[in-house]
Amino acid sequence: MYADLKIKRDVYGTEEHQMLRETIREYLKQHVLPYREEWEEQGFCSREAWLKAGELGLLNISLSEAYGGGGLDFSFSALLIEEMSRAFADSPGISMHSDIVGPYIERYGSETLKQKYLPKMATGEAIGSLGMTEPSTGSDVQAIQTNAVDKGDYWLLNGSKTFITIGYTSDFTIVACKTRPNTPQQGISLLVVDADSEGFSKGKPFKKIGLKTSDTCELFFEDVKVPKENILGEEGKGFIYMMTELPRERLTIALQAIGACEGAIEDAIKYTSERTAFGQPVAGFQNTQFKMAEMATKLQIHQVFVDKCTELLADHKLTAEQASMAKFSATDAQFEILDTCLQLHGGYGYIWEYPIARAFADSRVARIYGGTNEIMKVMIARRLFSGYYAQLKAKRKAAMAN
Ligand SMILES: Cc1cc2nc3c(=O)[nH]c(=O)nc-3n(C[C@H](O)[C@H](O)[C@H](O)COP(=O)(O)OP(=O)(O)OC[C@H]3O[C@@H](n4cnc5c(N)ncnc54)[C@H](O)[C@@H]3O)c2cc1C
């Protein structure tokens, strides 16, 4: 049996982890999966699903109890992310809200901001999104053009963002903007902008090839007056904060990949054992057996590495490069595994009502968002060649001095 083959995962080893797993499965069964088609049609999921998640303690799991969070370590968030993805249903975008947006507020927000947003985020009454990408720039974050001018008692925000996960349903967005234009990274700050602010408007959810129930949209800011106190941390330090937080985001994507592969392999074992061709189950062909053996092995290898990264993040020791390795390698593996599992379904794999079709479509973006896999390799290579880059920098400095 597949379960017997797998190395025991100590990272989720406690009774509390098991209880959480059961709560998530029940939540998905009752409050997410039955509504999936309706949400796909409208392009976003319902507020009720968020409120229910809040009621069951599934939001802000690893944030402080003092602000309504679960007070648990990151391994509990990791379990939630994987379980959702395993059921091919990260529909409500919980990981963006709880594991990306929430930590920004908790780490860099003033006491007033924490009190204002975190308890409501934990109940699902306030949904948060994060806006970095702009129509003209994604990978090159320092080139953003959205700007906020200091007007004494408020920031005057202008610009736009695109591809914002749960941007349409969110009640506030953390917006990366230049507060000191014409200076590169020093000029980026993070502002918390309420969705009902005058001058803040949203596009309709994009029609995407996958992740159809988690909305993605454009956000527009036209002379939005953002209260001065809505800045996260210090003015001009936004780029450093983003670089500090991105490893967590990248690990969440690797975890989604692990969950989706697990679900797809289990599904393919079942499907190929039942489906017959040439008088025998598809599982009886050596090709199927070899493919399944290869996929189970590949997943196992990635799972061990991602588990290690989860432990490192829980101990605040995960480096940007390790997170980049986890993100690009796990999502590349996800792409290959889901494609192979779909192939093993034959024509039915291409039909939307079959879980593998959805999972395949959902998985494609994993190599793009959270920083493309090419950018992950750029980051890893930069560390590998740090000596070379240091020399280059010194040469440039010397040339400028002459
Ligand atoms: C469904 C979805 C959800 C998203 N959610 C969010 C969100 O919530 N918040 C947010 O801020 N953004 C979000 N994004 C945006 C996402 O992070 C960006 O799309 C991604 O970072 C790539 O940026 P880009 O689209 O501008 O591509 P570009 O930067 O234009 O890149 C185009 C191509 O060039 C390659 N490239 C760029 N630079 C280099 C380089 N130095 N070396 C080699 N190749 C390079 C890229 O890898 C890519 O293949 C989301 C995107 C999608 C599709």
Image (cartoon, rainbow, N blue to C red):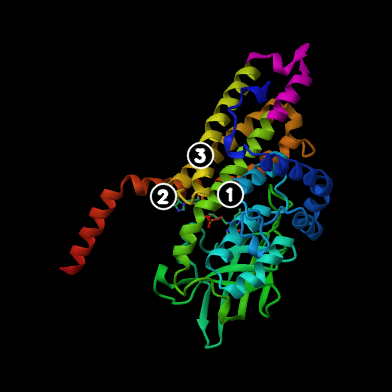
Q: Quadrant of residue 128?
A: bottom right
Q: Which mark is residue 328?
A: none
- Residue drawn where x is 44% and y is 50% of the image: 320
Q: Amino acid at mark 3?
A: Lys
Closer to the chain start, of discs 3 and 1, is 1
**Quadrant where the N terminus is found in the figure:** top right
| Residue 307 x %, y % | 54, 39
Closer to the chain start, of discs 1 and 2, is 1
Q: Which mark is residue 74?
A: 1
Work out whether 16 lies above or below 189.
Answer: above
Q: What stretch of residues is rendered in magenta?
A: 266-286
**Quadrant where the C terminus is found in the figure:** bottom left
User: What secondary structure is the stretch in magenta mostly built from?
Assistant: helix
Give SS at disc 1.
helix
- Residue drawn where x is 57% and y is 51% of the image: 369
| Residue 318 x %, y % | 46, 48
Is residue 94 highlighted in magenta? no
**Residue count near mark 3 (Cα–Cα under 10 Å), binned few <14, some 14–19, many ≥20:** some
Residue denoted by label 2: 379
Work out whether 94 lies above or below 278.
Answer: below
Residue denoted by label 3: 308
Closer to the chain start, of discs 2 and 3, is 3
**Which of pointers 1 and 2 indicates the residue nearer the eye?**
1
- Residue drawn where x is 66% and y is 57% of the image: 60
Q: Residue furthest bottom?
A: 152
Give SS at disc 3.
helix
